[in-house]
Amino acid sequence: VNKGTLTLALKEGAVKGYGAVIRALAAANPASEAYGTTQFAEAQVDAWLNFASLELSAHTPAPAPAGMVADALGRLEAVLATRTFLVGEALTVADAVVAQAAKRYAAASSTPNLARWAKTVAAQLEQRASAAWASAAEASAAG
């Protein structure tokens, strides 16, 4: 971290900025499908990362203005009325980032779709983390 700017050092050079670092990390492992499976899905992921950053102030400690948040959460609630995930049929980095950003604003009683989705995202992330730890343990034991 450099004066509030998130920086990721790669062999090719530094990647700076919240969205750029998230995108680089997600794209680094294409097999994970965390950044989507097509160019269109990648564009949708980018749009949701921008939504989290610009409308929910995901990258700042200060909350976004109340009116902007209410509008953003209303749009998110409407989108989630017909979807399990924000992009495609599987968890992407968009779900993880937007869920984390929305967590500080959403009241479950007024946003039931968002609450359902947030629980799904949390469970999926926990499952993936457990699987990653199990794989690392197996690799360590075999090595």
Image: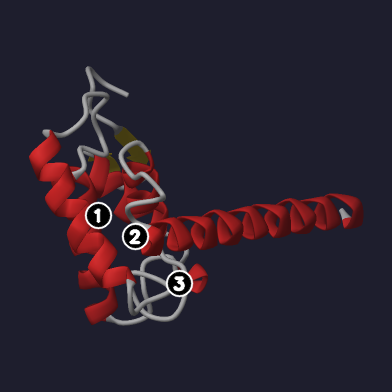
Report crowding for label 1: few under 14, some 14 to 19, many 20 or more residues within 10 A (C-alpha): many
Answer yes or no: is residue 101 visible: yes
Callout in the foreground (2, 3): 2
Where residue 56 appears, x then y in whole percent? 21, 43
Instruction: Write down the residue under mark 3.
Output: 33
Q: Which badge, 2 or 3, is on the more N-terminal residue? A: 3
Q: Look at the numbered discs 2 and 1 and tell me whether their residues touch, using CB distance below 8 Å.
A: yes
Residue 139 located left or right of residue 45: right
Q: Which numbered disc covers residue 75? A: none
Report crowding for label 3: few under 14, some 14 to 19, many 20 or more residues within 10 A (C-alpha): some
* Nearer-the-camera pick, 96 or 77: 77
Mark 3: amino acid: Glu
Q: Which badge, 2 or 1, is on the more N-terminal residue? A: 1
* Nearer-the-camera pick, 135 or 81: 81
Where residue 133 appears, x then y in whole percent? 73, 51
Kind of element beneath mark 2: helix
Instruction: Write down the residue under mark 2.
Output: 94
Instruction: Write down the residue under mark 1.
Output: 49
Where residue 99 appears, x then y in whole percent? 38, 51
Answer yes or no: is residue 27 visible: no
Q: Identify the residue at horizontal 12%, vertical 52% (top origin).
A: 71
Q: Identify the residue at horizontal 63%, vertical 53% (top origin).
A: 126
Mark 2: amino acid: Ala
